Image (tube, grey):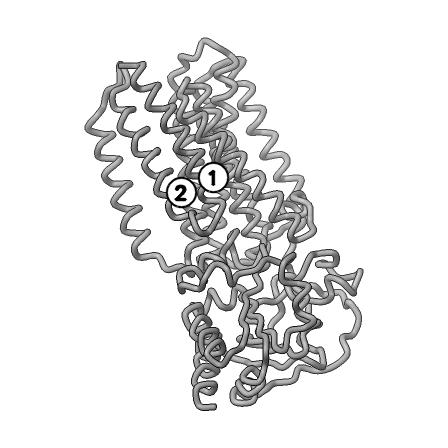
C-alpha cells in the first residue's frame, strides 16, 4: 500500500505546483485554487491508508468539524473581511505544524537527532506563526487597536523570550526531558504574540505574507521529520512563495523587513515635518460629477477606505456610467493598498471589474500627467507626494502613485484623519485637489446619480 501512497503524494506535489502556477494570473487564479484543493483532498484521503495508522474515528470527526467550520465561514465572510480570514488560516497551518511537533517530541521516539532538530525548528516556527496570526486577526477585526502596541525595553524583552525558546529547544534535543516541551511551546507562543504587537495594521500585507511563509516552512520541517513527502513539497512551495511575496511587499514600501517587524511603524508622528502650504478644499457632489463628466480620461485609485465602506460595486457602477459617456476609465493598484497582498484586486474582482482595467504602479504612473481626473477612494499614504519630496517624512522613498500629476484630483475620505504613517497627506493640500467627505459607498453612489442626471 505504501507505494500507492507515495505515488499519490507525488501527484499531490505536482498539483500543488500546477495550482500555484495558475494562481499567478488573475485570469486563472480560481482554477489554480481548485486544483490545489483537489491536491489537498487526495493527500488527506490517502493518508488514512498509512500502515499502522489508528484512531480513524477521531480523525474523521476532526475532518468533518474542521471542514464544516471552514465551509460556513467561507460562505459568510464578506470580501471586506478577507484579510482576517487569511490571517486565521495562516495561523491554523502554523498551529497544526506546532501540534504535530508537540506530539512527536512528547513521544520522544526520534532516534535521529537531525530529524528531532527539524521537529523542534518546525514547532518553534509554527507556534510563532500561530499566535502571531491570531494577533494579526485581532488587529484587523478591530478586537484590539491597529496602532502598534509598545512598551519600554520591548525589543530586549522579545529577544529574551525568543532566546529562551531556542535554549529550551536545544535542551530538549540534548537531554530529552519531557516536561520541557510545554515550556518550550509556551515561550514560542508568547514570542509570536509579542513579535506582532508592535506592528501596525497598515503593515499587515507584509505580516500576512511573512506568517504564510513561516507556516510553509514549519510544515516542510515537520514533513522532513516525519518522512512525509506531501508535507515537504507543500511546505516548501508555500514557504518559498510566501517569502518572495514578503520581500516584494516590503520593497513596495521601501522599507526593510526588520523595520516592518521592529520599527513600530504607524504610531502618530509628533515631530513636525515642515508646514504644508495650502488648505483642504471641499467640493460638492454635483460639481465633482460635472468635472468627471467632461473628462477624457479618469483613473480610479482604490484604498482601504473602499474596503471598509464595501464600495467596490458602486465604484464599478461609476466606471460604467463614465464609460457610457465615452470616457476612458482605468484603475491604479498600489501593491500595499489595503490589508493583505492583492486586497484591492480581490475586491474589484468580486465586483466584476475586468482584469484588463487594473494597472500596477509601473504601468499607470506615466499616465497621470495626461489624466483629467484622478479619483482617490480611501487611499492615503500610497498617494502622498511627501514620499518623493520630504526627506524627513517616515515614508520618504516609498514608491507611490503619482496622482498629484493629474490635472484634477478628487479625494473621497471619511474625515480629516491621518493615514497609517500618522502624517498629513500633501496631496490633499494641492491646488488641483478637491475633497469629498463621507462614506465611500454613499459618496460614489451620489456621484453616479448626479452623472446620470447630466
105 or 362, which is in the foreground?
A: 362
Q: Which residue is mark 1?
A: 21
> Badge 1: few (under 14), some or many (20 or more) residues near its Cα, within 10 Å?
some
Q: Is residue 425 visible?
A: no
Q: Secondary structure at mark 2?
A: helix
374 or 141, which is in the foreground?
A: 374
Q: Which mark is residue 32?
A: 2
Identify whether 271 is placed above or below 319: above
Q: Residue furthest front?
A: 326
Q: Residue furthest top?
A: 111
**Left or right: 390, with 158 as reference point:** right
Identify whether 295 is placed above or below 101: below
Give the number of marks: 2
Q: Secondary structure at mark 1?
A: helix
Q: Is residue 351 visible?
A: yes
Residue 180 location in percent, x, y? 47, 22
The quarter of the rendered structure image containing the N terminus is: top left
Q: Residue at x 64, y 48 (%)?
A: 250
> Badge 2: few (under 14), some or many (20 or more) residues near its Cα, within 10 Å?
many
230 or 18, which is in the foreground?
A: 18
Residue 391 location in percent, x, y? 80, 60
275 or 312, which is in the foreground?
A: 312
Q: Are marks 1 and 2 in contact (CB under 8 Å)?
A: yes
Q: Residue at x 27, y 42 (%)?
A: 67
Q: CA distance from mark 1 to mark 2?
A: 7 Å
Identify whether 399 is placed above or below 170: below
Q: Residue at x 60, y 80 (%)?
A: 435
Residue 162 location in percent, x, y? 59, 33
Residue 39 location in percent, x, y? 34, 33
Identify whether 125 is placed above or below 305: above
Amino acid at each position: 500500500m505504501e507505494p500507492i501512497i507515495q505515488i499519490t503524494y507525488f501527484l499531490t506535489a505536482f498539483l500543488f505546483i500546477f495550482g500555484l502556477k495558475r494562481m499567478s494570473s488573475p485570469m486563472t487564479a480560481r482554477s489554480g485554487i481548485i486544483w490545489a484543493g483537489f491536491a489537498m483532498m487526495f493527500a488527506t484521503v490517502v493518508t488514512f491508508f498509512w500502515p499502522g495508522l489508528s484512531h480513524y474515528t477521531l480523525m474523521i470527526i476532526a475532518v468533518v468539524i474542521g471542514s464544516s467550520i471552514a465551509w460556513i465561514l467561507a460562505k459568510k465572510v464578506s470580501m471586506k473581511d478577507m484579510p482576517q480570514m487569511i490571517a486565521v488560516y495562516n495561523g491554523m497551518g502554523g498551529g497544526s505544524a506546532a501540534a504535530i511537533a508537540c506530539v512527536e517530541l512528547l513521544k520522544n521516539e526520534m532516534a535521529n537527532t537531525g530529524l528531532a532538530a527539524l521537529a523542534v525548528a518546525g514547532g518553534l516556527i509554527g507556534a510563532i506563526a500561530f499566535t502571531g496570526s491570531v494577533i494579526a486577526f485581532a488587529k484587523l477585526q478591530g478586537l484590539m487597536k491597529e496602532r502598534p502596541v509598545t512598551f519600554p525595553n520591548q525589543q530586549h524583552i522579545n529577544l529574551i523570550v525568543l532566546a529562551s525558546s531556542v535554549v529550551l529547544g536545544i535542551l530538549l534535543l540534548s537531554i530529552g526531558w519531557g516536561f520541557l516541551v510545554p515550556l518550550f511551546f509556551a515561550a514560542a507562543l508568547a514570542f509570536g504574540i509579542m513579535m506582532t504587537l508592535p506592528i501596525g495594521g497598515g503593515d499587515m500585507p507584509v505580516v500576512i505574507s511573512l506568517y504564510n511563509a513561516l507556516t510553509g516552512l514549519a510544515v516542510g520541517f515537520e514533513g522532513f521529520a516525519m518522512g512525509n513527502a506531501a508535507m515537504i513539497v507543500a511546505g516548501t512551495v508555500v514557504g518559498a512563495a510566501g517569502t518572495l511575496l514578503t520581500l516584494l511587499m516590503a520593497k513596495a514600501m521601501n522599507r526593510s523587513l526588520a523595520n516592518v517587524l521592529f520599527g513600530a511603524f504607524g504610531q502618530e508622528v509628533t515631530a513636525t515635518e515642515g508646514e504644508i502650504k495650502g488648505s483642504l478644499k471641499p467640493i460638492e457632489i454635483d460639481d465633482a460629477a460635472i468635472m468627471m463628466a467632461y473628462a477624457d480620461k479618469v483613473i480610479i485609485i482604490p484604498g482601504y477606505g473602499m474596503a471598509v465602506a464595501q464600495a467596490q460595486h458602486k465604484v464599478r457602477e461609476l466606471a460604467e456610467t463614465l464609460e457610457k459617456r465615452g470616457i476612458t476609465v482605468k484603475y491604479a493598484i498600489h501593491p500595499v493598498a489595503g490589508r493583505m497582498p492583492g486586497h484591492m484586486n480581490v475586491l474589484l474582482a468580486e465586483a466584476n471589474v475586468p482584469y484588463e482595467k487594473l494597472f500596477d504602479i509601473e504601468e499607470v504612473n506615466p499616465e497621470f500627467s495626461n489624466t483629467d481626473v484622478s479619483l482617490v477612494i480611501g487611499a492615503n499614504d500610497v498617494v502622498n507626494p511627501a514620499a518623493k519630496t520630504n526627506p524627513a517624512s517616515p515614508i520618504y522613498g516609498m514608491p507611490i502613485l503619482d496622482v498629484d500629476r493629474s490635472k484634477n484630483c478628487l479625494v473621497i475620505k471619511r474625515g480629516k484623519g491621518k493615514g497609517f504613517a500618522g502624517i498629513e497627506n500633501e496631496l490633499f493640500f494641492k491646488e488641483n485637489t478637491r475633497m469629498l467627505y463621507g462614506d465611500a459607498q454613499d459618496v460614489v453612489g451620489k456621484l453616479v446619480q448626479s452623472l446620470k442626471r447630466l
